[in-house]
Image (tube, rainbow, N blue to C red):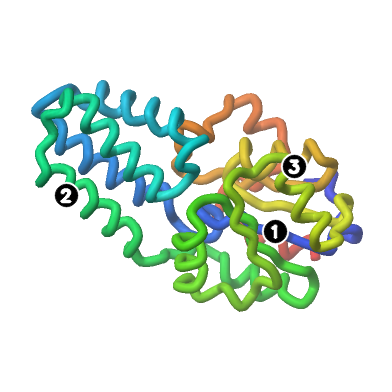
Amino acid sequence: MDKINWKEVKTIAFDADDTLWRNEEIFMAAQEDFIRLLLDYHSEDYIKSHLSAIQTRNLAIFGYGIKGFTLSMIETAIELTEGRILGREIHEIIRLAKAMVSEPIELLPNIESILQQLQGQFQLMVITKGDLLDQESKLSRSGVAHYFDYVEVVSNKTPEAYEEILSRYQIKKSEFLMIGNSLRSDILPILDIGSHAIHIPYAFTWDHEQVSESDLASYPHIPKLTEIKELSLYV
C-alpha cells in the first residue's frame, strides 16, 4: 500500500459482493442444492464442472448475477438429463433462485465503521457488476447506502467501463482508488488505466474470477478482510 499517495486520492470506490457483504456463499449453497437434485443422473464433480462451463459460456449472453446463474442451472439440468428433467425439478431450481434473491444481507466485518471514517473525507462510490434490480435491492437492504455519493452497476468491469465512469463524474485517474475482492475485476482493470487499487481477498472466489497465487501476491492488498480498518491509518 506504500505506492498509494493518500494525499492525492479524492474518490474511493468499493465493490459490493464479497467486499461490502457476503455473497459467494449464497451461490455455493444453491449450487450444492442443485447438484443434489441431479445426483441420480451424474456424479457431483461432473455436474459441477458442467455447470461451471455453461455459466462461463453464458456470461456474454445473460451477464453476471442470480438470474444468469439460474438460467445456466436450468440449461445444465436439461443437457445432463438429455431433456428428461421433470417440471417439478425445474420448479425446484426456480425456488432456489428466489431463495437466493431474498437472502438477508450480511455486512462483512468493519465495513460500516470504515465507511463512517471515510465519509466526508472522500467522495465514496459503489461500483459493482451484475443484475441491476438485484444489486440495487441488496444495497438498499444493506443499511449502508447513505454513505455513498454514487452507485454504478455495470454489466462487466473492463478498463473501458471504469474509464467511462471516471469520465462521466470528471474524476482524475490519479485521484481514484478502487477497493475490491476480485483481482480480475476490481484491481487489474484499474491498474491498467493508471488508477489506484487495493485488493481485499475473500475466503471464497468464484472459478471465473480465479487468478494465480503469484498474481495475488503481486498487487497492493490487505491480507485479511478484518484488516480493512487499517485504511483509517492512511486518512
Q: Position of residue 33 (x, y in %)?
A: 21, 43
The image quarter in which residue 50 lies? top left
The mark closer to the camera, 2 or 1, is: 2
Give the secondary structure at mark 3.
Answer: helix
The mark closer to the camera, 3 or 1, is: 3
Tell me which numbered mark, 2 or 1, is placed earlier along the sequence: 1
Structural crowding at the residue carrying mark 2, measured as other residues with C-alpha within 10 Å and reported as few (<14), some (14–19) or many (≥20): few
Q: Position of residue 121 (x, y in %)?
A: 80, 73
Give how far apart the Cα atoms at labels 2 and 1 are.
38 Å
Q: Residue at x 70, y 72 (%)?
A: 149
In the displayed structure, 99 sits above or below 3; it is below
Q: Is residue 160 left or right of residue 156?
A: right
- The residue to which callout 3 is attached is 160
Q: Please give the label number shown on residue 13.
A: 1
The image quarter in which residue 28 lies? top left
User: Disc 3 vs disc 1: Cβ atoms closer than 8 Å?
Assistant: no
Q: Is residue 203 left or right of residue 28?
A: right
Q: Residue at x 57, y 28 (%)?
A: 211
Tell me which numbered mark, 3 or 1, is placed earlier along the sequence: 1
Structural crowding at the residue carrying mark 1, measured as other residues with C-alpha within 10 Å and reported as few (<14), some (14–19) or many (≥20): many
Q: Is residue 8 visible?
A: yes
Give amino acid for label 2: His
Q: Is residue 227 visible?
A: no
Give amino acid for label 3: Glu
Q: Position of residue 223 (x, y in %)?
A: 61, 44
Give the secondary structure at mark 2.
Answer: helix
Front in this rendered view, residue 227 or 156: 156
**Quarter that holds the C terminus:** bottom right
Tell me which numbered mark, 2 or 3, is placed earlier along the sequence: 2
Q: Residue at x 48, y 37 (%)?
A: 61
